[in-house]
Amino acid sequence: MSNVHEQETLHIREQVELAPLTTIQIGGPARFFAAARSRPHLVALIDWARRHDHNFFILGGGSNLLFDDNGYDGLVIHMQLKGVTQQTTDRGKVRLRAAAGENWDAFVAHCVTQNLAGLTCLSGIPGCVGAAPIQNIGAYGQEVAQTLHQVEILDLDRNQTRILDNRECAFAYRDSIFKRALRNRAVVTAVSFDLTPNGRPTLAYPDLVKRLGADATLTQVRETVLAVRREKSMVADPADPNARSCGSFFTNPIISATAYAAFKTRCPQTHPAWPQDADRVKLSAAWLIERAGFHKGWVAGRAGLSEKHCLALINRNQAKASDVIALKKDIQRGVFETFGIELEPEPLLLSQGLN
């Protein structure tokens, strides 16, 4: 079979623009592109890329990444595996299994409609289900790790399906085994969660507690979370220029007790800090950025900071990846010079020159 005929059989297109498939709307074309709508098709696409010595990348909702201005020199596989199934466990939980290509917020909305507690505060996060365990997404007092049961993966080394339970995923703050030992060695194909039927919503975040009473329903919590996120332009909205971002661009730094003592000598004023254990403290990246002189609405040519949320680096006006990265480096430099703290980017930066 000729390569051209094989590409047609696998529905592989060439020179597909990636910017429209990302929430920040930045990135050049993919050399090759295909949507994987079944597991056999996904396996065949990966096999094709390997046989022809092409890199490949699995694209979900495009919400936590930045493509290079030159695009991607390989095969971009758009994850389109769909389907949600449900069963009751022997512990009284309801286990929902969602394929990796399901829209995350639609999945959370489904859980709320079914009156299943455990994911409600994660409403409005853009992206697909398959990305949720990789990043261990979290917001407003909840994390995926708290209710995740298992992750189904395609093991690229063994070329077979494997099941990882919660403990094997090695979850931490915005981290997991998928960003470490299994990076580029596994593709998430489905995720299952154990949720509580008719359970109470999680109300641990001060902004939610302030807005809601103790008897708030799951629906009320979801609506409030969405409202809070909209106020910060942190939901996908093509009409909102402040939403043209990768989401939060920096993680909250977690530093050692020794580093925190040094930080306090440079920053004697009151500041947000959350002890993680006896030896580590989490600081607020947003607070550090603003106190280093980068305010909401900061303009840096075609890029800038959101007018609503200084953690979001936005595409103001046909920005390039290089514009965003220049701003990223300026912020990192400013925070380090002011406080001695190194900020780590949260999005996946898909080019050597972007880091």
Image (cartoon, grey):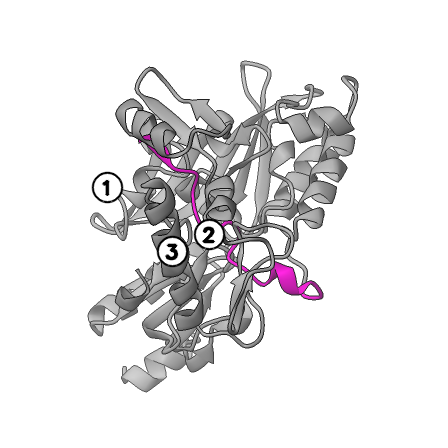
Q: Earlier in the sequence, mark 3 or mark 1?
A: 1
Could you say which is closer to the camera, residue 181 or residue 228?
Answer: 228
Circle 3/circle 1 CB separation < 8 Å: no
Q: Is residue 354 left or right of residue 13?
A: left
Dot 1 crowding, Cα within 10 Å, few <14, some 14–19, many 20+: few
Snapshot quadrant of residue 88: top right
Residue 226, image x, y percentages? 71, 43
Say which of 71 and 256 sits in front: 256
- Relative to 285, is 56 above or below? below
The majority secondary structure of the magenta stretch comes to loop
Determine whether the residue tagged by mark 2 lies in a helix, strand or loop: loop
Q: Which residue is mark 3?
A: 348
Q: Nearer the viewer, mark 1 or mark 2?
A: 2
- Magenta segment: 238-255
Amino acid type assigned to the residue bearing label 1 in the image: Ala
Query: Quadrant of residue 180 in the image?
Result: top left
